Amino acid sequence: NAGVMQNPRHLVRRRGQEARLRCSPMKGHSHVYWYRQLPEEGLKFMVYLQKENIIDESGMPKERFSAEFPKEGPSILRIQQVVRGDSAAYFCASSPGLAGVKGADTQYFGPGTRLTVL
Amino acid sequence: GENVEQHPSTLSVQEGDSAVIKCTYSDSASNYFPWYKQELGKGPQLIIDIRSNVGEKKDQRIAVTLNKTAKHFSLHITETQPEDSAVYFCASTGGAAGNKLTFGGGTRVLVKP
């Protein structure tokens, strides 16, 4: 049973370019979360999505960042016009999200995408 | 919003000794508390979790305790081994935070052989 998959694992962009990070949740999971980890720091919540819906984007910067989880295909975190401060590890997590089921909210993390902005 | 504090930030123990990491949270409505282990260059790995209706949970050498009144929870690792060396994060969710995890700042554990 494959875990959460993220690609690319490493991404280098120059300032002003766009970064696209992809996340495929575990099989059977319908909830996806994105977190950002700055060097030597903890993880900070960015956005929580279900299929075709953004449930909570309270941690997402208001500009340049967007996320989607389409009906088919992986979840995408997009960062437009990247700046050096966007350099970080971006982690995706997924959970089953089955209402009333024990463990439905347990989040399992992928290996992350390490973004470097030159 | 929810705030999670974690101590210590670094912990060095001799192989075979025990390690204890403590976390406090601010939202009394939080009801789920997972612990993650993160090795260098990898994603966080869930190692144990506890829900608010339970005071203690154990899985082999790892145990977690929860004190809802004091709003703190702790991770205990017994008989530490070199492969336990990693960064450990506590987290909380539920309450006003909904499903999102609020993480502590992490504890870097070094087990010396």
Image (spheres, coloured by chain):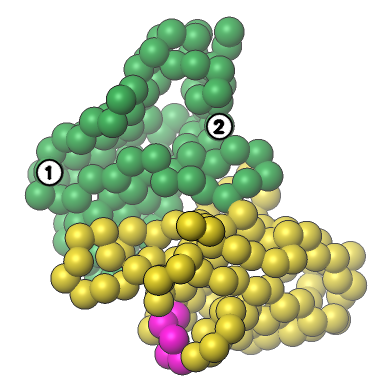
**Which chain is painted in yellow?**
A
Are there few (<14), some (14-19), or many (20+) residues within 10 Å of tag 2? some
Element assignment for label 2? strand
Quadrant into which the C terminus of chain A falls: bottom right
Are there few (<14), some (14-19), or many (20+) residues within 10 Å of tag 1? few
- Left-right relation of A97 to A49: left
- Left-right relation of B10 to A115: left
The answer to whether B1 is drawn above or below residue A18 in the figure is: above
List x then y, in percent, for residue B112.
57, 11
Q: Residue at x 37, y 30 (%)?
A: B21
Q: Residue at x 63, y 58 (%)?
A: A112
List x then y, in percent, for residue B4.
36, 50
What type is the residue that disc 1 sits on? Val
Among numbered discs 1 and 2, the one appearing first in the sequence: 1
Check whether the beta carbons of the residues at disc 1 and disc 2 lie within 8 A of each other.
Answer: no
Residue farthest to the front, as pictured:
A1
A97, A42: nearer the viewer: A97
Q: Which residues fall within the magenta stretch?
A: A49-54
Q: Chain of mark 2?
A: B
List x then y, in percent, for residue A12.
85, 65
Q: Which mark is residue B86?
A: 2
What type is the residue that disc 2 sits on? Ala
List x then y, in percent, for residue A101.
20, 66
Residue A51, picture quadrant: bottom left
Tell me, yes or no, whether the highlighted magenta stretch contains residue A83.
no
Q: Which residue is disc 1 drawn over?
A: B54
Compute the Cα span from label 1 to label 2. 27 Å
- Left-right relation of B32 to B106: left
Q: Colour of chain B?
A: green
